[in-house]
Amino acid sequence: MAIRELQALSIAPLQRVVLYQKYDVKRDLLRPAFIALTTRDEPIEIDEGRELGLETALQLAKAREKARAPVFAGKKPGNPRSPVALVGVELDALMKDVFNLTTSVESSSTPQTSTGQNPPGGSTQPNTQSEWSDSFFVDNSSQGEF
């Protein structure tokens, strides 16, 4: 129930990632936030990287580089100011690969713009009750804490 309420709140993508990581909420729910941070024009700032942690900040940098790789010759690959070259299924596949996401939850989560706001007319409620289960929490007992 708490996760459903969190999903309904308008939280900036960076703060959503930090919050979900702090409370070990399953990363699959962060796909819209990862996409927003990957496709926004501004690069990840140093203070944002500190908030996100080293692993997530580096994953975002990797996703941003791959999403902006040129699709034609003659352009410098990985230019952080290049427009995003991937969209739709390709961008979704990149998020799944870089962030090790297991399921597609886009249909059940609220899409966000690059500012982290819900788009006009965007849904804020999940489609079915079965989408909210104990599986949204990640067991990190085998991973070391810093």
Image (cartoon, helix red, strand yellow):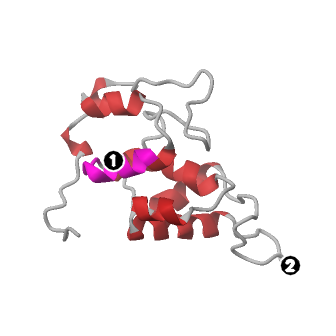
The percent coordinates of residue 3 (x first, y second) are: 29, 34
- Identified at 61% across, 29% down, the residue is 119
Of the two numbered discs 1 and 2 on the same chain, state the one appearing first in sequence.
Answer: 1
The amino acid marked with disc number 1 is Tyr
Circle 1 sits on which residue? 20
Q: Is residue 130 left or right of residue 11?
A: left
Q: Quadrant of the C terminus?
A: bottom left
Query: In this rendering, does residue 78 appear at all?
Result: yes
Mark 1 or 2: in front is: 1
The amino acid marked with disc number 2 is Gly
The percent coordinates of residue 123 (x first, y second) are: 50, 24
Q: Is residue 10 left or right of residue 132?
A: right
Give the extent of the magenta segment.
Answer: 15-25
- Taking the magenta stretch, the answer to whether it contains residue 17 is yes
* 123 in relation to 96, above or below: above
Circle 2 sits on which residue? 74
Secondary structure predominantly adopted by residues drawn in magenta:
helix
Circles 1 and 2: CB atoms closer than 8 Å: no
The percent coordinates of residue 131 (x first, y second) are: 31, 33
Q: Secondary structure at mark 2?
A: loop
Q: Secondary structure at mark 1?
A: helix
The number of discs equals 2
- Taking the magenta stretch, the answer to whether it contains residue 16 is yes
Residue at the top extreme, as displayed? 121
* 75 in relation to 60, above or below: below
Callout 1 crowding tier (Cα within 10 Å): few <14, some 14–19, many ≥20 = some
